[in-house]
Amino acid sequence: MNGSARESTSVAIVGAGPAGLTLGHILAQAGVPFRIIERTTREHLLGRVRAGVLEQGTVDLLASLGLDADLRRRGLTHHGIYLQYEGRRHHVDFDELVGRTVTVYGQQALVAHLLAEHDRIGSDVRFETTGMQVDGLTTSSPTVHYVDASGPVELSCDVVVGADGYHGIGRQSLPAASRVAWERAYPYAWLGILADVEPSTDDLIYALHRDGFAMHSMRSREVSRLYLQVAPDESIDDWSDGRIWEALQTRLGVDGWTLAEGAVTEKSITPMRSFVASCLSHGRLFLAGDAGHIVPPTGAKGLNSAVADVALLGRALLDHRAGDDTGLATYSERALARQWKVQQFSQWMTQMLHVHDDGDASERGFAYRSQVGQLEYVTRSRAAQQSLAEQYAGLPFSEGAA
Ligand code: RFL
Ligand code: PHB
């Protein structure tokens, strides 16, 4: 680009979501130069309400980087989840079944903390960039082109990391042959709210109800997070706060328990999909997080998968700096081997807990009754519960190809 400022770094990270920000900290701690280039504003990043559950492996990685101070203070340790169907609620006790727990800590809080720590250590993070393009990926010195407030920039680097989410340019920069992906859209979406009210439960409740799935999560002792299965083309304008609470009361209700209501401070509808790219690398470009794979949120795996990817990639980048490229060469295969197990779990939880509206009355009845059968099996079989607990609490980050 004519007139571009020519700059250089070692690792160019596209995207300041959980994947990009965490990778930045792994590199910072090892003294590897990097730049994080983000399209949106800092305010937009800080305003996004998304995931809520951190696996033990995610918490451990953050702790190993010294990034767990806020998490320890504000995160809520959960020993299991409730599965609910046909008006009955059953506890699945992860701690007792597999000796592990999960931590409820909002992605919003995590991103805020990771950014604040980048500010504190003086990391190179650029916001509000446009015109992102990458080239020279199969050379030893690729270039990232973008425009920021100072004008066009030509950033040469050693490695480019596409941590830029599902809609980013990282995946689009793969050659056509490597861009093959497997995908599945679901015929429903999640309507999520944040409400200023003390959670009415100790552990998260996942409920199958004839009207559709509902979930009770939380962000703190004062803030509840709740979700409802809705049609994918549903308009949020058709869901008054009153209608939302009424649906939540119906779907989450069990005898002798009350769902406390409070002021709704945020509401949005999110479509659901499963998506896996066939390859997470091309030359010196590596994809991490939602850029390479998406899961429906029922298994609470998206954010955790992003962190699992950068744990592997960070290690591989440090080995690369030390002259060993084995980790980079096998990154895609290892990350995808773990990811397919996560995909299967997320799809299984989703299928088991959502109402399927397709087919005639007999097919719908068949689907619902076999889901109830599956939930009865899971809530009565220790082996099934152990399998659920092992996967929900999180497979090892090193879980990959043999
Ligand atoms: P992100 O968070 O999408 O960040 C990508 C960043 O890249 C930027 N970007 C660009 N920057 C520069 N140039 C470009 N051309 C760019 N294009 C894009 C974007 O602005 C953005 O800032 O991806 P990352 O880091 O891979 O993180 C993934 C997670 O955000 C995501 O998987 C989770 O939020 C998914 N998820 C959940 N995951 C869990 O592990 N546990 C949960 O409980 C959970 N619940 C959820 C969820 C996602 C949800 N929604 C809204 C999709 C619940 C919901 C409702
Ligand atoms: C959340 O708290 O936002 C949350 C929790 C569990 C999920 C999905 C989302 O499976």
Image (spheres, rainbow, N blue to C red):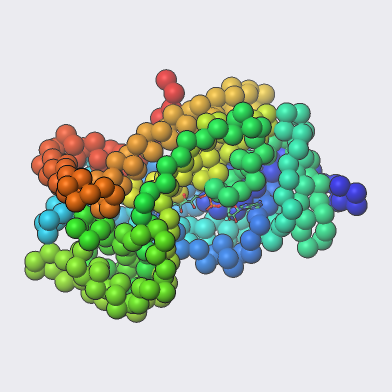
Residue ID at (81%, 51%): 153
Q: Which residue sits furthest right? A: 3
Vertical placement of 47 versus 363: above or below?
below
Residue 111 horizontal/vertical position (percent): 52, 58
Is residue 254 or residue 117 the one in the foreground? Answer: 254
Residue 239 as seen in the image, left or right of residue 8: left
Vertical placement of 293 versus 190: above or below?
above
Q: Which residue sits furthest top? A: 402
Residue 211 horizontal/vertical position (percent): 22, 61
Residue ID at (32%, 68%): 224
What is the quadrant of residue 30 in the picture? Answer: top right
Residue 93 as seen in the image, left or right of residue 334: left
Residue 295 horizontal/vertical position (percent): 42, 45
Is residue 322 or residue 205 the one in the foreground? Answer: 205
Residue ID at (46%, 63%): 49
Residue ID at (30%, 72%): 244
How many marks the image carries: the answer is 0
> Which quadrant does the C terminus fall into?
top left
What is the quadrant of residue 332 in the picture? Answer: top right
